[in-house]
Image: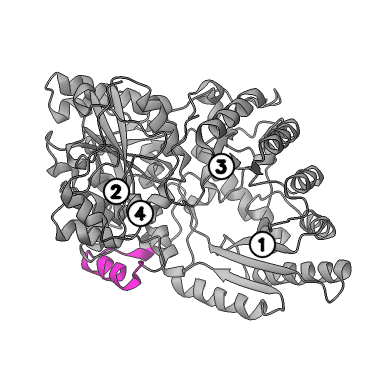
Amino acid sequence: MNCVKNKMDDKLIKILNQVEKPARYIGNELNTVLKDIDKVDCHLVFAFPDMYEIGMSFLGLEILYNIINKDENLYCERVFAPGMDMEEKLIEEKYELFSLETKTPIKKADVLGFTLQYEMTYTTILSMLKLGNIPLLAKDRGIEYPIVIGGGPCAFNPEPIADFFDVILIGDGEIQLPSVLNTIGKFKKADKTKDEILEELAKIDGVYVPKFYDIEYADNGTILDIKTNNSNAQLPVLRAFIENIDELEFPTKKIVPFIEVVHDRAVIETFRGCTRGCRFCQAGMIYRPVRERSVETIKKLAALQLDNSGHSEISLLSLSTSDYSEFENLALDLISDCKSRNVSLSLPSLRLDSFSFKVLEEIQGYKKSGLTFAPEAGTQRLRDVVNKGITESDIYDAVEQAITLGWKKIKFYFMIGLPTETYEDLDGIAEIARKVMDISKSINGKGGKFNITVSVANFVPKCGTPFQWFPQNSNEEFIEKHNYLSSKLKMKGVKFNYHDSATSIVEGVLAKGDRRLAKTILEAHKLGCTFDGWSEHFSKEKWDEAFKNTNMSKEFYAEREFGRNEILPWDIIDSGVSKDFLLKEYDKALEASITKDCRHGCTNCGINKYVECKQGGIYE
């Protein structure tokens, strides 16, 4: 590996002396990689469209950074959205946005790759392109500019941002992305045109090249037809699958930031996917099937990460940690290992059963932090609608056990605006809070200190789920429900939090939108929208103006029920889960009928057509 110095010129040093947290922009953290850009075939700048503190907590960045930099022909650097103060200085000083490792202007990279984690980052992507002096629309970028690619959960409906991207990657990226980069490097060395490169990329599994598809619309605004205009383009584009993640390269030399980030700890992914089938959960559908790492691999990776980073905490990452098939053995072994190192262990997303409480007791001891429960809905009927798979007795038994063991703070997560929801379901949220307070009083007495936080998120229907056809509540409906719950939850010891409704509406529009929304996103950017996921930056007024100026209707995308036979914008993508299965789950939701956890028998979601689906040998 040929190394170069991380250089900062006088102008950049002057800028950094005038901004908050300059360590966001200097690079040189422990375990970063430096290479000579001129001696690699393809140079990628991995772009996270949010602050450094958020992006450096994203495990996906670490995984891809590690894998790409292990290839001597490739180089991966990082760039994050600069803070507002830094953005102002870059514009004022006419200084282009640059990579962290080598301070190279991002427009000089071969590839600029954005992770698409959240719809409300779309205007921030445009802000970063503008700060890099890169044309915002793909059609305006020649071969002299980077090939702009994207990937992540939002890629499962790439249409609202299709005009901004040359390539969008669907599915697992650990093998797919290096293949894409090596192809780009090979074709650039051969002086191929941009179109020739894109045609070759379109042959790779899970690669979507938006310009190779034409969309025809009906008079009522729905999609009439989707066609390809290039023989290499696949329709639909099938998600890329990795069957065995236990054999995948995983980072053991985690980059250690100079400043505190949101999750400042070592992290190991125990398994990918989920078997529970919650109908609102996009991740639970699009990351099927479950693929696990072995206990031995997890323990080895954990030890290496701690050795190479100096972190004092390690966390296990999955959609439901205690659903890991050997959770008991893994948890006990890690507790022992962490105690010997004087390192704390974090086990998020636990199913709070008896063994989990034993684990939490062992980890936290007398110093008990808060516990989190996610019933999602206030009544059993609505929990069955969403296929949550927990009962009232599950909730209250777990709460009683927690309070008996000494926990003094409990947080509950719910969603409002779920399909078929009534005000009786909202009353159920308040009833759960009241009963939990009663349980605390019965155990600790009236004078015992005990607090509940009730947090509600606004339900946003997402593509690839059984709820993708359902309408979203309007802004006014969300506000009315927030106010109703506020009055119902005025109880001593109960704190109520809720999410801004206007942000949720825009998220819902972008989640279910089509290509015509690109002009609205572009207009919102021109009006000054950026960091829309941050409440202090989001502007309902600017977004309303953007929709008005582009003659686009929020209601058309978010508040109407999509037809069962309607061509959906995201039908261009195949997640592997069949539409027939999603429609059956849609109908079962209307009946409040539950579907079993697929660990207890195959539910015929369709994933077996593409990849072996197994866990413990119990799939049919």
Region in magenta: 537-555
Q: Indicate which label's residue lies in the foreground, 3 or 4.
A: 4
* Residue 260 horizontal side relative to residue 149, left or right: right
Query: Dot 1, how many residues are within 10 Å of its Cα: few (below 14), some (14-19), or many (20+)?
Result: some
Q: x%, y% of residue 326?
A: 72, 30
The amino acid at mark 2 is Ile
Q: Which residue is mark 2?
A: 161
Q: CA distance from mark 3 to mark 2?
A: 23 Å
Label ID, residue 122:
none
Q: At 35% from the left edge and 57% from the top edge, which residue is drawn?
A: 21
Q: Nearer the viewer, mark 3 or mark 1?
A: 1
Point 69% across, 47% down: residue: 594
Residue 284: which numbered mark, if any?
A: 3
Label 3 close to label 1 by CB (< 8 Å): no
Q: Earlier in the sequence, mark 2 or mark 4?
A: 4
Local SS, label 3: helix
Residues at marks 2 and 4 touching, judged by CB atoms closer than 8 Å: no
- Location of mark 4 (residue): 121
Q: CA distance from mark 1 to mark 2?
A: 36 Å
| Image quadrant assignment for residue 608 | top right
Q: Nearer the viewer, residue 619 or 324?
A: 324
What type is the residue that disc 1 sits on? Answer: Lys
Measured in 3D between alpha carbons, the distance from the residue under mark 1 to the one under mark 4, in whole angstroms, is 27 Å
The span from disc 3 to disc 4 (Cα, nearest Å) is 22 Å
Residue shown at 73%/34% (left/top)? 336
Q: Is residue 150 magenta?
A: no
x and y percent of residue 499 in the render?
50, 67
Amino acid type, residue under disc 4 in the picture = Thr
The label number, if any, that marks residue 411 in the structure image? 1
Give the residue type that dot 3 points to: Gly
The residues bearing labels 3 and 1 have C-alpha atoms spaced at a distance of: 22 Å
